[in-house]
Image (cartoon, rainbow, N blue to C red):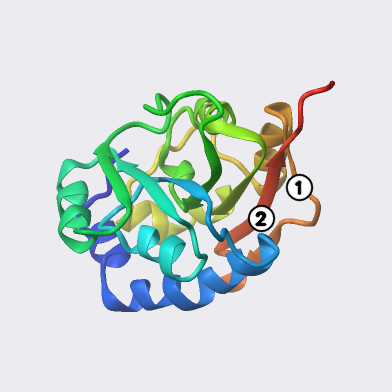
Amino acid sequence: MKLNAFERAAMNNPVRAAHQHHREAAWFRRLSGGGLSGQQVLEVGCGRGVGAEVILDRLGAAWVAAFDLDESMVELAQRRLHGRPVQLSVGDVCEIAQPTASVDAVVDFGIIHHVPDWQQAVAEIARVLRPGGLVLFEEVPREMLDTWAFRTFTVHPHENRFQPGDFADELARNGLHGSGEIERHLGGMVFVGAVRKTEPAP
């Protein structure tokens, strides 16, 4: 689902950008064991391009492919990231236009809770990730989406939402396993974690 006007303003402003560059980047650096140095990375839901900046500048990726369902966001990202090693496109996380096992890491800055069929999104992320590859995720749990503020000011699917445990179970069903506990941050408003794709049996 595309963001409404309130969500676009909340997600596309200097305060949010600073939070991504500093606090969220620090979470992901720690969870990844030091960053994504030299890696080929896919960002699902690029917005206006701040996440790709973080992946390049704070996590050290060599190259980023990023997409968004909203054409206007992709246009903003193209202007922001002009000349950088980023491939941008309009796309759907349930039908990722990347070959199977083609990226070293996938980064999700809070996109999957917007997706009605989020289980298909997880399956697609697992498909494009190379064996041993990493997924870094920040997501919003069901109880936050059920609060008055979220229901009044934002637009999200109401059915088939997830708690951290549900999300971890679905990742595991797709061969994506974490080495540590999922962390809650911002008073429980978001949860973050890291999982790796299981190496195939010899």
- SS state under label 1: loop
Residue 178 badge: 1
Question: Which image quarter holds the C terminus?
Answer: top right
- SS state under label 2: strand
Q: Is residue 84 visible?
A: yes
Q: Is residue 146 visible?
A: no
Query: Which residue is at the front of the view, 103 or 25?
Result: 103
Type of the residue with mark 1: Gly
Q: Is residue 13 above or below residue 92?
A: below
Query: Which residue is at the front of the view, 37 or 170?
Result: 37
- Residue at coordinates 34% horizontally, 31% vertically from top-left? 92
In the image: residue 18, left or right of residue 88: right
Q: Is residue 24 above or below residue 100?
A: below
Q: Position of residue 105 (x, y in %)?
A: 56, 46
Q: Is residue 76 above or below residue 96?
A: below
In the image: residue 23, left or right of residue 88: right
The residue labelled by disc 2 is 193
Type of the residue with mark 2: Gly
- The residue positioned farthest toward the right in the image shown: 202
- Residue at coordinates 30% horizontally, 33% vertically from top-left? 91
- Residue at coordinates 35% horizontally, 72% vertically from top-left? 17
Res 138 quadrant in image: bottom right
In the image: residue 99, left or right of residue 80: right
Q: Position of residue 53 (x, y in %)?
A: 36, 64
Distance between the alpha carbons at the discs numbered 1 and 2: 8 Å
- Residue at coordinates 83% horizontally, 22% vertically from top-left? 201
Residue 144 badge: none
At label 2, counting other C-alpha atoms closer than 10 Å, the crowd grade (few under 14, some 14-19, many 20 or more) is many
In the image: residue 63, left or right of residue 176: left
Q: Does the residue at mark 1 contact the one at mark 2 (Cβ under 8 Å)?
A: yes
Q: Position of residue 104 (x, y in %)?
A: 57, 43
